[in-house]
Image (cartoon, rainbow, N blue to C red):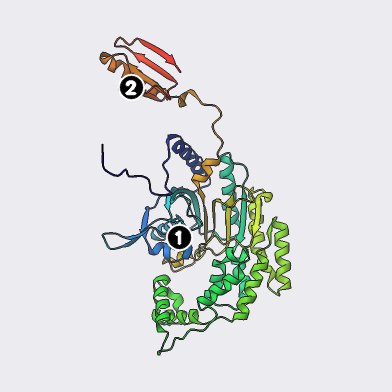
Amino acid sequence: MSTLRQIRRLPNTFDADAAQVARAQSAAAICREMLSLRGYELIDTPMFEESELFLRKSGGELSSRLYDFEEPGGFRTSLRPEFTAPVIRHSIETGEAGSKTCRYQYSGPVFRYAAPEHPDGSKTRQFNQLGAELIGAPAPHADGEIMSIVTEGLDALGIPPATIALGHVGLLRRLLRKFELSERAGQFLLANAEAIASGKLEEVSETATKLSLLTAKDTSASGGTGDIKQIEQVLDRSLGPLGANAGSRTRAEVIARLARKQMAADDPAKFESALSMLSELMTVSGDPDKALDDGRRLAVSAKLDEKCFMLLEQVVESAVDQGVDRSTISIRYGLARGVAYYTGMVFDILESPDATDSLGGGGRYDGLTRALGLDADVPALGFAYTLDALVKLMPSASDETANSNPVLVRPADDTAWRAAASVAAKLREEGRVAVLDTGNDDTAGFSRVITVDSSDGTTESVR
């Protein structure tokens, strides 16, 4: 008896059996064909990348879940947690980003760690994404194209119409301008959209105070320099090449100026007013027409620019023009998707209006190219299905064809191997699944068992 410990799967990882793999491959093939017919070119990217690729614009939520390590060559490396940043990197390296409209599609595994206490702590650490990125296409018509692809793919897979929960980060940013907050404070509020939508305003305010957003920091030579030096280091890593837009200032001067701006405290009264406005807006959701009207009324009462709601209205109309059923769109002003690189519309794909687990999602990220080193902001957006979740919702095959029923071909004795192999080969030429019995195969699971003797005579039993 072995004394070695049995090695088991890591927690929250899963094996897929043959049927599950076949269904996943079938779903992927259907979606890839649909995307190919729309002009999306299939590409693949490495499963691991330089960690900085995912840190520059992903935000704390995603970066805290990286499988991060230092490889023998010295690079700080991460397993990919998503495809968007690698695809943008690819488009920059090939020179295509900014030079033409690029349509890419992809599929493969991604990796995100979640500690047991994390809200996703019970979910798998590895899952499969299938999606597309549209680079170089401005809003709103490209936004409508991506949303129409999402619904077309679900229809092709036989999945009933889902709910597209639709928000708009750009709209929220425009509303926040009225409050004259720092970029740091504005980003903080957007990053806490879920908490604000849940009514946790006191908790958000307390966190802002702890982060010194509302209290001026000492950046003089006599004290507090550690904080500003840390911010300068983060900015230095994040900016990439400054290019011509830096003007006459040196890189060091630009970084120092940005660091000082980030260190400046925000007016607590303005911060609380912005927080209150967002809290009220984020209670609005549902039917696009009503949600847009309610949002405009709120903006007018708060003396904000109601015209910014056109950004979201145009996305809705473009999606409807391109075949999306208006009744499947649900406005959610509190939706931010937890990734800092989004700049425009964002959406989650839900099985039903009340569902909490997402089937995938996406959005617009016009600033990601500059964050990854290109000296230009290229309009871009994309989406990804969580393929594993879609496969579970696909209808089961109703009628099994003969080709899907495996046949066991068994030699009658040791002299019949060549004849049995020939029979099995002919079956496979016909497109049938034929397994040659090696002497230890169980007949369970086979619809037919064919016994072959050396004279090519056969007897058959049908199960």
Say few, some or many: other residues with alpha carbon within 10 Å of mark 2 (under 14 / 14 to 19 / 20 or more).
many
Viewer-proximal residue among 9 and 244: 9
Badge 1 marks a residue whose secondary structure is: loop
Q: Look at the image and tell me in which quarter the N terminus lies.
A: top left
Which quarter of the figure has residue 76? bottom left
Question: Based on the displayed image, in which of its 4 quarters is residue 406 positioned?
Answer: top left
| Residue 356 appearing in the image | yes
Q: How many numbered tags mark residues here?
A: 2
SS class of the residue under badge 2? loop
**Residue at image point 42% right, 84% down:** 224
Instruction: Give above or below for 329 relative to 277.
Output: above
Task: Judge depth for marks 1 and 2 and give the one in front.
Answer: 2
Whichever of labels 1 and 2 marks the residue nearer the N terminus, that label is 1
* Amino acid bearing label 1: Ala
Q: Amino acid at mark 2?
A: Asp
Q: Is residue 284 above or below residue 2?
A: below
Give the percent coordinates (x, y) of residue 164. Answer: 61, 52
Q: Residues within 10 Å of mark 1 (few under 14, many from 20)?
A: many
Q: State the image coordinates of residue 87 (x, y, percent, origin top left).
A: 43, 56
Q: Position of residue 5 (x, y in %)?
A: 30, 44
Measuring 47% from the left and 40% from the top, which residue is drawn there? 24
Residue drawn at point x = 42 percent, y = 72 percent = 239
The residues tagged by marks 1 and 2 sit, at their Cα atoms, a distance apart of 54 Å
Q: Residue at horizontal 46%, vertical 75%?
A: 245
The residue at which mark 1 appears reads as 97
Q: Can you identify the residue that label 2 sits on? A: 437
Q: Position of residue 223 (x, y in %)?
A: 41, 87
Q: Pointer 1 and pointer 2: residues touching (CB < 8 Å)?
A: no
* Side (left or right) of 323 relative to 113: right
